[in-house]
Structure formats: structure tokens, C-alpha cells
Image: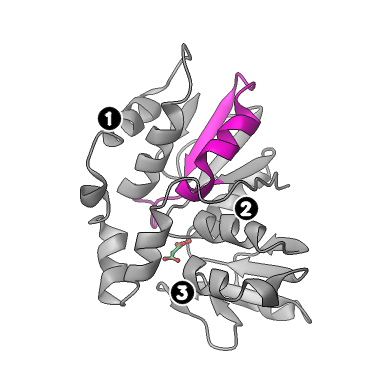
Amino acid sequence: INVYTTYLENIEKHDIYVLIDTLRATSTISTLLHCKIKSLEIVESLEKAFLKKNKILIGERNAQKIKGFDYSNSPVEILKNKEKLNGKEIVLTTTNGAKAFNKISSMGKVIPLSLLNLNSVYEYVKDYTDIGIVCSGSNGVSSLEDLYTAGLFLRNFKDVDLNDGAKIALSIANLSVEEIKNSDHARTMKRLNLNEDIKFCFKLNVFNEVIIME
Ligand code: MLT
């Protein structure tokens, strides 16, 4: 198993990819799956998102809601609107998560992972022997919370060959959750009063839905 600490690293070919953006893109995706959406498309640019007529637009820039969009990239906001999202076609754009997804989806199948659906994703991928775990990070810099999620996920695997990125993730998983909740991006979110999202994104295994994206 290889862990890539940001999506801008030189990512090798693997049988399956697991994508992590704990704060908040993959937490949003886990929440959307729970809301029983009909489809999910991830786009990098606002222009592309605005071209998608009659779809629900969800996303952020600088961690804030985009003018003209239906919802922010906020799992808490999405969960509050669960009934309205049932059966809907969704377009999602985020600063880092969307770019990471576009890069690795051109290489193979991608399973978005968050703390919210950690065990279910493990159950799905546990029989694979060649897994690439890609942390989104933030603008090319590693994020503590992504490595933490990767580390907790890796703890499930026994007797597997790990790269240095995976060993770094495992050691970060030993830090206290309070330390992780004080990461660079978490602090940016706190300044924007997004404390509820931080709290929610650190809940373990509240959802059991898994999606394989292509
Ligand atoms: C991203 O893709 O950069 C994010 O998920 C940022 C955020 O929503 O806070």
C-alpha cells in the first residue's frame, strides 16, 4: 500500500485508489451518498459547474460557499438538507479535492474515504493487494487531517508492504484528535466559524455507504 501525502506527488499505477480530503471534500461525498443522491459529478472549475443546467451545485472557494451555488462544501449543511437532496443529480467543485479526484480518476477507480465511512471503505478494499491512498492536502502541502485519516485506515491492514508515506500516516494517527483538529486548514475553518463542520468530519463511522467513482 502506498500513501501519497499530496495529490501532486508522483503517483504510481495501482489496482485501486482511495482518495482522502477529510476537511472536507470526501466527508461531503460520504454525506451526499447517505442522502441517496442520484448521481455525482466532480468538476474543477466554476465555469464547468455553471454549464450543468438543472443540477444541484455544491462547492467552495476559500472554504466558503460560491455565489449562485445551492450549497457549500459542508457536510453539516448537506445533512440538514437530506430530504431535498434525495434522488438529485449533483455537481461538486472544491479547491483541492476536485483536482485530486480528476488526477487519479484518469489512472483508475477511485473510492472517496473520510472518517465518516472508514470501516465501510475498508470492508470494500480489504482484498486488494495493491492500493494507492491519495491525500488531497492543500495547494501542494500535506494536511495533518488527511494523513490522520490515512493512518487510522491503514491500522486495519495486517502484514502489508508500506511505503514511507504510509509509515508517516501511521505515526500521525498516534497524535491526539485535538492536535489534528488544530491543523492549518482546521484553523482557517475556525476563523470562518465552520466549527460544526470540523466536529462532524471527525466523527468515526457514522455512514456505511461506499462509492466507486470513475
Ligand atoms: C478542498 O477541496 O480544498 C476542500 O475540501 C476545502 C474545504 O471545503 O474546506
Name the mark on residue 61.
3
Mark 2 to mark 1: distance in Å?
Answer: 28 Å
Answer with left or right where residue 7 lies relative to residue 46. Answer: left
| Residue behind mark 1 | 171
The image shows residue 203 at horizontal and vertical percentages of: 41, 52
Instruction: From this view, report whether residue 72 is shown above or below residue 101.
Output: below
Name the quadrant containing residue 12. Answer: top right
Residue wearing tag 2: 102
Residue 9: horizontal and vertical position, in percent?
45, 40
Q: Which of marks 2 and 1 is nearer the N terminus?
A: 2
Pointers 1 and 3 in contact (C-beta within 8 Å): no
Front residue of 76/25: it is 76
Magenta span contains residue 81: no
Q: Give the range drawn in magenta.
A: 113-141
Horizontal relation, residue 200 to residue 132: left or right? left
Residue 66 visible in this rendered orientation of the protein: yes
Q: Residues within 10 Å of mark 1 (few under 14, many from 20)?
A: few
The residue lying toward the viewer, choosing from 174 and 204, is: 204
CB of residue at label 3: within 8 Å of ligand 1?
no
Q: Element at badge 2?
A: helix
Ligand 1 rendered quadrant: bottom left
Q: Real-space Cα distance between discs 1 and 3? A: 31 Å
Query: In the figure, residue 54 lies in which quadrant?
Result: bottom right
